[in-house]
Image (tube, rainbow, N blue to C red):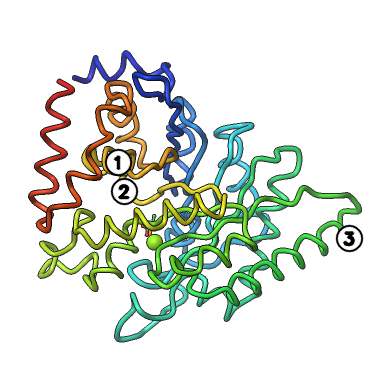
Amino acid sequence: LEELVQSIADKPAETKDGTQVSLAINTGLAADFEVVRGIDADGIGLYRTEIPFMVRNCFPSESEQCALYQKALDAYPGKSINMRTLDVGGDKPLPYFPIEEDNPFLGWRGIRMTLDHPEILLVQVRAMLKANIDRGNLQILLPMITSVQEVDECLRLIKQAHAELEEELQRTLVKPKVGVMLEVPAAIYQIGLLSKKVDFFSVGTNDLTQYLLAVDRNNARVANLYTYYHPGVLEALKFIANQCHKFNTPVSICGEMAGEPIGLLILMSLGYRKFSMSAQNLLKAKWILRHISLSDIADLQHKVSFETDPEAIKLIVSEKLDQLG
Ligand code: PEP
Ligand code: MG
């Protein structure tokens, strides 16, 4: 299998009937950028900037951040790099910035924390904008967005950082595209409003599943309840695809669901064509895409819609996968 998978390394990610699919990488460690450089991917769909913050003992300075972000942008010149602003809290603690709370996943995490500390967000955005000089492939992604007001506030801060830097450096700087993570259920019902404000969406299926099912994604006791293949989760993903289409706003999937063969097939059948995943799943995903045509999966969405049991849904898709050989 390894050999088979390697043989498609340089081939495009497209289905048998020629539908182009975008496969990008999820990353977070500086060392990753050296590794992924050799992998043929459509840029970085999710750069988790909190990871370099987590492995230190104090906040990295603006210039330290800038150096790091340059590396990320250079991993795929000319291809989009979605840099997500700091997404700490929840299961991602910073040793030098303790957050103590009872329900961390429902608490002060992601954009909630950084909007309460605009100085942290401003430094980070400045570092991103500086890194983007002479590169131009930066896109900024906002995590844990729940409301339109949060987006307005983020856009205001990004604009401020941009204006200050232009003034300081006495030059014009590219305005990067800005996108919102769809991972809090309430945000899904505001896609129409949000699409007027931002350039793209990225679905975080890891958190979206956790919040739709009310299942802590890291709690072993309820791990059996955590599944992307719950009919409610699939219905939400279908709704998102339709809304993004209706409001003409690009959408991609950056949760790990797309890295699972079953997940990828279902997402394709729902109409998604842009995915990012951890590097180790990328070639497998490409292999699957290259072995299906849209007609093979045309009935999939319809078929699984009659099932109420995630296991039955997985079985239907597995059978499809088996037919690919
Ligand atoms: C997600 O929630 O699906 C996601 C991609 O972000 P993270 O796993 O970093 O929370
Ligand atoms: Mg998330």
Write down the quadrant of residue 211 in the picture. Answer: bottom left
Viewport quadrant of the C terminus: top left
Labelled pair 2, 3 in contact (Cβ < 8 Å): no
Q: Mark 1 points at which residue?
A: 259
**Direction from residue 158 to residue 254 in the image, left or right:** left
Q: Residue at x 42, y 58 (%)?
A: 55
2 or 3: mark nearer the eye = 2
Write down the quadrant of residue 19 in the picture. Answer: top left
Residue 172, percent from left and from top: 86, 49
Residue type pointed to by label 2:
Glu
Categorize mark 1 by other alpha carbons within 10 Å: few (<14), some (14-19), many (20+): many
Q: Residue at x 64, y 75 (%)?
A: 118
Residue 181, percent from left and from top: 48, 60
Q: How far apart in space, not on screen, are marks 1 and 3 (Cα)?
A: 43 Å
Q: Which of marks 2 and 3 is nearer the N terminus?
A: 3
Q: Is residue 95 above or below residue 298?
A: below
Q: Is residue 183 above or below residue 237?
A: below
Q: Which of marks 1 and 3 is nearer the N terminus?
A: 3
Q: What element carries label 2?
A: helix
Q: Name the residue under label 2.
A: 256
Q: What element carries label 3?
A: helix
Q: Which residue is drawn at 29% across and 58% down?
A: 235
Which numbered marker is on residue 167? 3
Residue that extends furthest to the right in the rendered view of this protein: 170
Residue closest to the eye, 30 or 267:
267
Residue closest to the eye, 57 or 7:
7
- Within 8 Å of ligand 1, the CB of disc 2? yes
Which numbered marker is on residue 277? none
